[in-house]
Image (tube, helix red, strand yellow):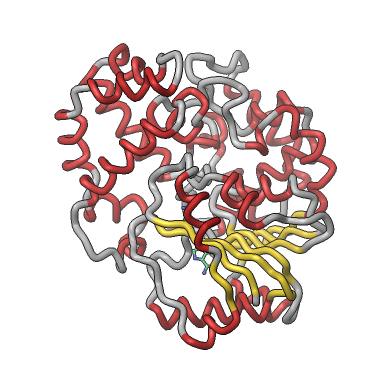
Amino acid sequence: MIKTAVVYSNVWEDPELNRVSLQVKPGQNVLSITSGGCNSLCLLLEDPKKLISIDLNTAQLAMLELKRAAIIELEYEDFIEVLGTPFFRKLSTRPAHYRIDLYNKIKKHMPGYAVDFWDQNQQLLKDGAMMCGKVEKFFAIYRTILKWLYGEKEILKLFEARDLAEQKEIYKNFRKKKWNGLHRILLNRTILSLVKGAHSFAMVDFEDFAGNLNRKRTLGMTRFFNPDNYFMCLLMLGGHYHEKGMSPYLLRENFPKLKKNIGALEIYKGTIGDVLKKEGPGTYDRLNLSNIFEWMTNEVFNSIIRECIELSRPGARMAWRYTFARPRELDAENLSRLEYEPELSDRLFKQDRAFIYESFHVYHLK
Ligand SMILES: C[S@@+](CC[C@H](N)C(=O)[O-])C[C@H]1O[C@@H](n2cnc3c(N)ncnc32)[C@H](O)[C@@H]1O
């Protein structure tokens, strides 16, 4: 019996930041933190020789195993269907058991632990695996309350502007009092800890999560055109607004490449240290480190960075981010090995369609 649950069925991190910062070259080896698996699959589109996608949570790995098996076995429409890819106001025409039929067809490509997980959680497949994470379920509660407070018509105005300039105007005039009130009630340390685990916020040294996220909501609403920003659509509407506004690994035009490259993906339960023990030093060129340092002390952060450096080949590039916490500081030894790229980090941070993050950091090996 697998007891862990999926926390993130999507990666709420903009894959474009990884693509531009890591600059994966064909033939390179890439390490990527799994989470919902989306961004590992997006990096696979860059033609690496090998991509190892790691996580400590078995349920997250089972999520990626589902996506991988679907890519191997299915054609595009069924790939989108088995994941329960949500589209705003466009429900699947298939009955729920069709997803189970597809799952039964693809499970031969999954290892035993992933089959056990999905066998035990068939209801998640019926309901749509792509929105089954604890974070996604929390967002569903959030938008239900928001809809109750404002009515759907009012919320939809934020998605119906003709362009970004008009959207900014609509957002500026939107009555935000009840919205901010909801943030005060829902977005605090206690409730967020229930969703993501208290450890996630151990290093956050402020309490005004609502204020922090109000500010970031304004960034999201004023920098990016909502219908094209699938992060905003999934959060506020529970589905993609249109077929082009999805993560690259879900786009129809990228599916043949994904199928071609899927053999380069290794899904691995363990830490960066475990990969180092398994594969030895000097074996990876690119590292997508998500926001794993969020809750670590400076000491632990620096010891993991040391492992990353040891794992890296000359010229290796790595990137990480923080959601709320202030960045950890590299110690002298790590600083002597890594070169920060401040302009690129800053430029990409400003382009972050996932808009909830506090900072983005790009480094390369000196
Ligand atoms: C850091 S969390 C953040 C999720 C992310 N911000 C998102 O929106 O999807 C992503 C994943 O990292 C995994 N994780 C955390 N620390 C890790 C570590 N040291 N090694 C491998 N995986 C780790 C967690 O289990 C989780 O599934």
Which residue corresponds to the image point at 66% horizontal and 59% vertical from the top-left?
A: 53
Residue 155 placement (x, y as % from top left): 31, 19
Residue 31 figure quarter: bottom right
Quadrant the C terminus occupies: bottom right
In front of the other: 346 or 177: 346
- Taking the view exactly as shown, the residue that stands out farthest to the bottom is 333
In front of the other: 72 or 179: 179
> Does residue 116 show up?
no
Q: Is residue 92 left or right of residue 135?
A: right
Residue 14 placement (x, y as % from top left): 53, 44
Which residue corresponds to the image point at 40% horizontal and 72% vertical from the top-left?
A: 328
Quadrant the N terminus occupies: bottom right
The image shows a total of numbered marks equal to: 0
Residue 323 figure quarter: bottom left
Which residue corresponds to the image point at 64% horizontal and 26% vertical from the top-left?
A: 81
Which residue corresponds to the image point at 30% horizontal and 34% vertical from the top-left?
A: 142
Q: Is residue 136 left or right of residue 185?
A: right
